[in-house]
Image (cartoon, rainbow, N blue to C red):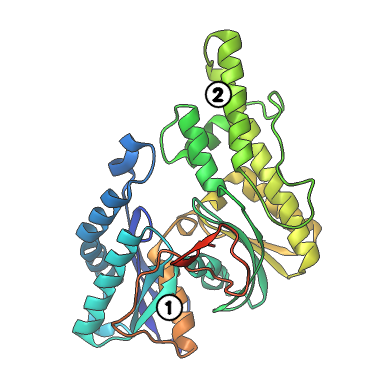
Amino acid sequence: MDDLIFLGIESSCDDTAAAVVTGDRRILSSVVSSQTDLHADFGGVVPEIAARAHAERLDLAVEQALAEAGLGLDALSGIAVTAGPGLIGGVMAGVMCAKGLAAGTGLPLVGVNHLAGHALTPRLTDGVDFPYLMLLVSGGHCQFLRVEGPDDFTRLGGTIDDAPGEAFDKIAKLLALPQPGGPHVEAEAAQGDPHRIPLPRPLLDRPGCDMSFSGLKTAVLRQRDALIADQGGLRAADRRDLCAAFQTAVAEVLAEKSRRALAGSPAPVLAVAGGVAANRQIRAALEAVAGAAGARFLAPPLRLCTDNGAMIAWAGIERFRMGHRDGLDLSARPRWPLDRRAAPMLGSGKKGAKA
């Protein structure tokens, strides 16, 4: 099935994306429309604004992706769409767009788990074989997965509270840095002293691969307030040093937990995906851990770290090859854990496990 050509649609958070990908791993186009400017004044993503923007931009993103690929709808083999998890308004917008295209063209429709899109990215970029170890680390999620197949994921551990990307955003807000926080905290950290201000390394004193970043965020807040009380304000050097200390703490926690994951479930490849995978210090720490364990380290190109339609198209191709098809009754899901056998980490409700 190397001759497959899939359109992928992604709208789970604040990026409206569409892409065209082939069964032999060629990305013919990838269009991402960022909403950063729409949410900048609010210090985070506003779900209602995001949903409206998706509804306005999805058809334009699809049209542009097809144009850049030089293809019409009649050249496609199928349509893949993020059906969850995510902000439900955005997920619904993407699912409805994909349903309309499928109904109008008769093309097969494949609903994709957004997290599976990230987790299968190493298959798209590097053609790696199963199994491999994946650290999925983004704004809303952080977990270690042993990837055995396109729909076979075993969770080895994950965050019990804030995801690292969420923590980066909150730290940026605490320090009056722009959103999204990750790139701005990293830029400040590059000029700071990571050893001046002591911060904890949460859960390193406990066995296993679970992580926690909420307490680390609180520790930064207390250190910031102490500096302001002592000095009557926060100097630029203080902000840089706080960012450096925080980023180093996150990198060391992720590195140690990765070491444990590799020791407990050896794999030939340690891959990382998600927006936080763009952080250079974290990448370097994970690469060192992989090397020490004799595993190959893989990180996607930066443009494929954050949300994109190419990973959804590829995940759709993987599921399509397994015989999976969805009908026009495909539902948008705010929650959709990859490892359905594992106990919920962040609680559960009427709509199911969060992660």
Q: From the image, which quarter does the C terminus lie in?
A: bottom right
| Residue under numbered circle 1 | 316
Neighbourhood count class around disc 1 (C-alpha, 10 Å): few under 14, some 14–19, many 20 upward = many
Residue 287 location, quadrant? bottom right
Relative height, residue 165 to residue 170 (above, below): below
Disc 1 marks a residue whose amino acid type is Gly
Q: Earlier in the sequence, mark 1 or mark 2?
A: 2
- Horizontal side, residue 55 vs residue 3: left or right: left
Neighbourhood count class around disc 2 (C-alpha, 10 Å): few under 14, some 14–19, many 20 upward = many
Q: Position of residue 229 (x, y in %)?
A: 57, 12
Which residue is farthest front?
350
Residue at 39% across, 68% down:
333
- Horizontal side, residue 294 vs residue 134: left or right: right
Q: Position of residue 62 (x, y in %)?
A: 26, 67
What separation in Å lies between label 1 and label 2 (alpha carbons)?
43 Å
Disc 2 marks a residue whose amino acid type is Arg
| Residue under numbered circle 2 | 239
Residue at 62% across, 75% down:
341
Residue at 73% across, 46% down:
203
Callout 1: helix, strand or loop? helix
Residue 190 seen in render = no
Q: Position of residue 95 (x, y in %)?
A: 30, 71
Residue 307 location, quadrant? bottom left
Relative height, residue 33 to residue 185 (above, below): below
- Horizontal side, residue 220 vs residue 295: left or right: left
Name the foreground residue: 57 vs 125: 57
Residue 138 seen in render = yes
Q: From the image, which quarter does the N terminus lie in?
A: bottom left
Callout 2: helix, strand or loop? helix
Name the foreground residue: 298 vs 119: 119
Name the foreground residue: 15 vs 28: 15
